[in-house]
Image (cartoon, rainbow, N blue to C red):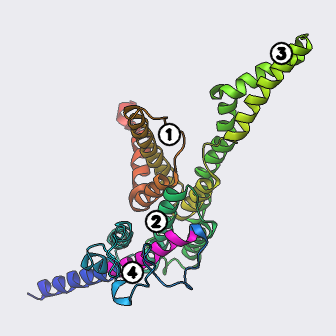
């Protein structure tokens, strides 16, 4: 009977922790909504009170309770009755669930509270970046600096205070290698290989411009032919200028994966990149099929940050384990001695 009582008490302790973490998470999620909407347009996060995006009425404190106020108001403004975006409750609920999942993944008794708390802060920054990039195809530098700082403190803290940051199996070397394991390939592919491939293989304007330049340089043309070719060349150059430089990844993607590798280690960073590329390819295929069905021009570029964020969040829970399983699968088993005679 005493054993059952102790087990019930321990279960109640865990449930209490998860409920508290979830409630704290949805509260943080409410602040993340403010960051997602205000940071891209340069608005202050603290000086301006929350207000209705339609009528401008300031929102009372009792209508700002995360998740519950949105449900109570049925997703409508109390002042004007206009619809409030479901994005608010989505971000709040997602933050709460991911925070609770983090503390499910790391046992609060054996792993402590500190490292999971830092991981929650890291995930909070990822949520802002993911929605921000989806909306604007840009990432706020301040948020990237924030998650990099969280990652750096976690790595240094794990080295200097292992008992406090227990539960964190990523070493400083793993984090250092992780910073470059994905970010450097992204940098090379995005800013070197992609422009070269686009310029020499994909772009018709680049190919036509090079062909005309060769003709103007090598062939002996009369004034009329030269003038005609020059006008055609100018048109192609103008088209090239209008499109601008073409990169495979943005610098925000590179910095994001550097921070992710520092926080989670190289194994999780590689898994996160694989998940992101897979999801991004599926999304690109869906966009292409949709454009074909609607007889529209195919979409050439879309935000890749949200897929990187999804990959990093998933990898923070089981990325290292997946990579270890994959490495074990590739490892050639040792042949027993009795088979060798």
- Per the rendering, the mark at residue 27 is 4
Picture quarter containing residue 314? bottom left
**Mark 3 → mark 4, Cα distance in angstroms:** 66 Å
> On screen, 107 above or below 235?
below
- The residue to which callout 1 is attached is 299
In the picture of the structure, the residue carrying the numbered disc 3 is 215
Crowding near pointer 4: few (<14 within 10 Å), some, many (20+)? some
Return the disc, 4 or 1, that comes first in the chain's sequence. 4
Question: Which quadrant does the N terminus fall into?
Answer: bottom left
Q: CA distance from mark 2 to mark 1?
A: 25 Å
Residue 120, image quadrant: bottom left
Whole-percent x, y for residue 19 in the image:
28, 80
Front disc: 2 or 1: 1
> Which one is in front, 219 or 261?
219
Percent coordinates x, y for residue 124 in the rendering: 46, 71
- Is residue 100 placed above or below 201 in the rendered structure? below
Magenta residues (range): 22-39
**Left or right position of 132 against 152:** left
Q: Earlier in the sequence, mark 3 or mark 4?
A: 4
**Neighbour class for label 1 at 10 Å: few (<14), some, many (≥20)?**
few
Q: Earlier in the sequence, mark 4 or mark 2?
A: 4
Q: How crowded is the residue under tag 3: few (<14 C-alpha within 10 Å), some, or many (20+)?
A: some
On the question of residue 200 being in view, the answer is no
The answer to whether marks 2 and 1 mark residues whose Cβ atoms lie closer than 8 Å is: no
Q: Secondary structure at mark 4?
A: helix
- Upstream in the sequence, badge 3 or badge 1? 3
Residue at image position (37%, 73%) is 92
- In the foreground, 317 or 70: 70
Secondary structure of the residue carrying numbered label 1: loop
Residue density around tag 2, few if under 14, some if 14–19, many if 20 or more, within 10 Å: many
């Amino acid at each position: 009977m005493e054993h059952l009582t102790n087990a019930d008490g321990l279960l109640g302790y865990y449930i209490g922790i998860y409920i508290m973490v979830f409630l704290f998470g949805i509260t943080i999620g409410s602040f993340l909504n403010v960051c997602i909407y205000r940071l891209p347009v340069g608005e202050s996060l603290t000086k301006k009170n929350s207000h209705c995006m339609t009528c401008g009425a300031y929102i009372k404190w009792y209508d700002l309770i995360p998740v519950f106020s949105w449900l109570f108001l049925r997703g409508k403004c109390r002042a004007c009755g206009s619809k409030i975006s479901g994005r608010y409750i989505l971000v709040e609920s997602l933050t709460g669930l991911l925070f609770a999942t983090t503390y499910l993944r790391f046992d609060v008794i054996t792993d402590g509270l500190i490292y999971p708390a830092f991981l929650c802060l890291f995930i909070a920054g990822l949520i802002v970046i993911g929605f921000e990039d989806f909306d604007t195809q840009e990432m706020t530098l301040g948020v990237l600096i924030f998650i990099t700082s969280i990652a750096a403190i976690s790595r240094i803290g794990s080295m200097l205070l292992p008992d406090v940051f227990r539960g964190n199996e990523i070493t400083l070397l793993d984090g250092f290698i992780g910073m470059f394991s994905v970010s450097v390939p992204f940098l090379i592919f995005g800013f070197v290989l992609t422009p070269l491939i686009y310029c020499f293989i994909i772009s018709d304007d680049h190919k036509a411009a090079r062909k005309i330049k060769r003709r103007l340089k090598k062939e002996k043309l009369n004034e009329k032919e030269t003038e005609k070719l020059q006008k055609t060349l100018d048109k192609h150059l103008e088209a090239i200028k209008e499109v601008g430089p073409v990169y495979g990844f943005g610098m925000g993607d590179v910095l994001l994966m550097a921070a992710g590798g520092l926080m989670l280690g190289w194994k999780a960073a590689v898994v996160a990149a694989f998940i992101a590329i897979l999801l991004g390819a599926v999304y690109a295929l869906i966009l292409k099929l949709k454009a074909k069905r609607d007889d529209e021009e195919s979409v050439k570029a879309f935000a890749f940050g949200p897929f990187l964020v999804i990959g990093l969040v998933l990898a923070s829970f089981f990325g290292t384990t997946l990579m270890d399983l994959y490495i074990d699968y590739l490892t050639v088993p040792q042949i027993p001695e009795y088979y060798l005679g």
